[in-house]
Amino acid sequence: MVLMRICVSLILLIYFVSAAQSQTLVSDPPSWADEAVWYQIFVERFRNGDPSNDPTEDDIRGFWFGPPPEDWAPTPWTHDWYEQEEWALDSDMEFYTAVQYRRYGGDLQGLIEKLDYLKELGVNALYLNPINDAPSLHKFDARHYRHVDRNFGPDPVGDRLIAESENPLDPNTWQWTAADSLFLELIQQVHARDMHIILDYSWNHTGIKFWAWEDILEHQQESDYAQWYEINSFDDPATADTNEFSYDGWLGVKSLPELAKVDIPSSHIHGAHEGNLHPDPKAHIYNVTRRWLDPNGDGDPEDGIDGFRLDVAEMVPLGFWRDYRQFVRDINPEAYLVGEVWWDSWPHQMADPTPWVQGDVFDAVMNYRWYMPTRSFFAQAPPHLTATEYVAHLDSIMTGTPSRFWNVMMNLTASHDTPRISTSIYNPSLYKYHQNPRENSDFKVNRPDMRTRSIHKMILVQQFTWPGAPHIWNGDEMGMWGGDDPDTRKPLLWDDYAFEDETTHPFELPRLSDPISADIELIQLYKSLIQIRKQNKELFIDGETNWIIVDDARRLLSYERRLRDRVALVIFNASDKEHTINILPQRQYQQVYPSKSTLEDSVLVMDPMSARIFFSENQP
C-alpha cells in the first residue's frame, strides 16, 4: 500500500511538473504587436547610403548561380530594370539568370537615412529581410548567422577578417564587426522613434559558404560538423573517379543545404510535424538568437531586436519551435515571433496555420491567406469570389485562431516572394502562379492602369480596417510595380534620384514606355489610412466585426467594427457601376475616407470601384 501511494505520488508529481512545463510554453503575443503597422525592408534594394561598401566579385561568390561574369560590377540604382548590363550581354545571359547577379549596394546607412521617412509614413514596426552575412542578394544562404552582411556596413574587408579570426562555436570569441555595430546603432535609432524591429532568419538551412558546411566539404565524415546537416552519404576516398557525397537541399536547391532534424517521422516532411533540430546546430542558433536579443548581455533586451520572422517555418519541427519560443521569451518576454507558413498544395491551397498560433509556437504567421481571397473578390482573380463566398472565406480562415493571435497576424498584400500588389491586380490570374513574363507571355510588365489603382485603394481600405496587423512591402506605397520574384525586388524610388524610363521587355516584346518616380498621391493615401487606424486603434483591434451588406448581384460589401458605443462602418462597391445604398437611419455618421464630411442623408451613392469609411459615436 505504501509503495502504491509512493507510485501514485510520483505519477502526480510527474504530471504536475509536466503540466507546469507545458504551461510555460504557452504565452500571449507581445503587448505592442496588435498596434503594429509593418513595413518590410529588403536592405539590398532599399537605399544605398554608402557607396564605398558596395559588393565586389569576391563578396558574391558562392550563391547558387555560380561565379560572377567577367567585368561584373554593381548595377546603377536608376537603371532600367529589364535592360541588360554590359557584363550580362558579354556573357550571353538571359535576363532572369543575370538579374540574380545584380547588386545595387543597398545598406544599413541607407536605412538609417530614411527612418524619418518611415516614421512620417506612420509605420511603427520594421521587418528586415535577412541581413546575416551571405553572398546572395536575398541573404537566405548564410555564410555567418552571427554577423551582419559585410557589405551592409562601412568596412567589408575588415569584417571578413574579424569573422575568420573567431571560433564560430564559442560566443566568447565573437566580436562586433563594423556592420554589426552599425546595426546596433540602427536598433537604437528605431527604438528612439517608438518603433520596433525584427530580423528574418532561416533556421532550416544555410548557404554553401557557411563555415560548418565548408568544413564538411573538406573533411567529409571526419568533420566535427558532419552531424549538422541532412547528409545521405559521404564521398568514398577509395573511389577516386566518383564523388558519392549526397545531401538534401531546401526544395532540392543544393546551394541551401538543410540542417539536420531529429525524431521526425520522415526525412522529407512538410507541414506541422513533431521533432526537433539536431542539438549542435540548435545550440549555435540559440547563441546567435541571444546575441541579437540582448547584445550587451546585461539581461535588459532594450538594446536588442524585438523578435524574428522565421523562414520556411513549416519545414522545421514543432518541437524546435516550442523550445525556441521558450528560449526567446526567457530573454525578452515581449519578443514577437512570426512564421512563414504558406502552401499546403501549390498553387491552390494554403496551409492552415492553426497548429502554429496557439501560444506555444508563434504569435502570428505571414497571412497570405487573407490576401489571396481579398484579391480574388476585389480584382476578380481566380477563383472569382462573390461577396458571399468572400465573406465565407474570411470567416473560415479566422476559425481556430484565438482572437489575441489573429489581432497580430501579419496581413500582407505583397512581399519579397510575391508580385507587388499593383501588378498582381493588373494581372488577375491565379495568385502567384505564372505571375511573371517567364511563364506567361501575356504578362503585363508596364505601369498598372487606373482601374488597377481603384482596386488597389479598395484592398487597402479593407486591410487597414480588418482584424490583424497591416503590412507594407517596401515601395508599394510609392506606386512601384513588378511581377513575382525577382521583379518584385526593384530598387526603391527615392526622390533624390533621376531614374531611367522603363522601356525594355525581358523577352524583347513590345511594351509601353513608363517614366519612373514615386507616386506622391499614393504615399499620401497610405499615410491617411495608417492615421485612421492608429487614431482608432482600440476599435480596429478589439472591435467585433459584423457583416452589414453582402450583395452578390451588385458586388456590394459592408461591415462594421463595433466597440461599445463606437462604430466604424466600411462600405465597398466592387462593381463597375454606380449603386445606391441605404444607411441605417438611427445613427449620425461622419465620413473619414476618402474625405471628411457628414452624411446628411440616409441614401448613399457609391461610385464604381470605391470604398468609404464612416464613424459614429452615437448610441443606436
Image (cartoon, grey):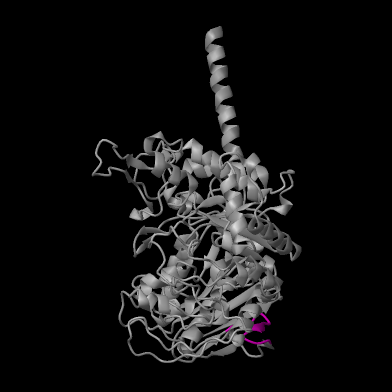
Relative placement, left or right, of 384 versus 290 is: left
Q: Residue at x 61, y 86 (%)?
A: 520
Q: What is the quadrant of residue 498 in the picture?
A: bottom right
Q: Is there any visible trace of residue 485 in the rendered image?
A: no
Relative placement, left or right, of 95 versus 457 is: left
Q: Position of residue 277 (x, y in %)?
A: 46, 40
Q: Is residue 419 magenta?
A: no
Quarter of the figure with the C terminus: bottom right
* Residue nearest the observer in this picture, 319 or 575: 319
- Give the answer, above or below, for where 478 lies relative to 178: below
Q: Position of residue 345 (x, y in %)?
A: 34, 59
Q: Residue at x 23, y 44 (%)?
A: 241
Q: Is there any visible trace of residue 472 in the rendered image?
A: yes
For the image shown, how many numbered marks are present on the structure? 0
* Residue nearest the observer in this picture, 120 or 393: 120
Relative placement, left or right, of 383 versus 423 is: left
* Residue nearest the observer in this picture, 466 or 52: 52
Q: Position of residue 181 (x, y in %)?
A: 68, 56
Q: Residue at x 54, y 71 (%)?
A: 45
Relative placement, left or right, of 249 versus 594 is: left
- Give the answer, above or below, for where 353 lies relative to 589: above
Q: Which residues are magenta?
A: 583-596
Magenta highlight: main SS = loop
Q: What is the quadrant of residue 233 in the picture?
A: top left
Q: Residue at x 61, y 55 (%)?
A: 159
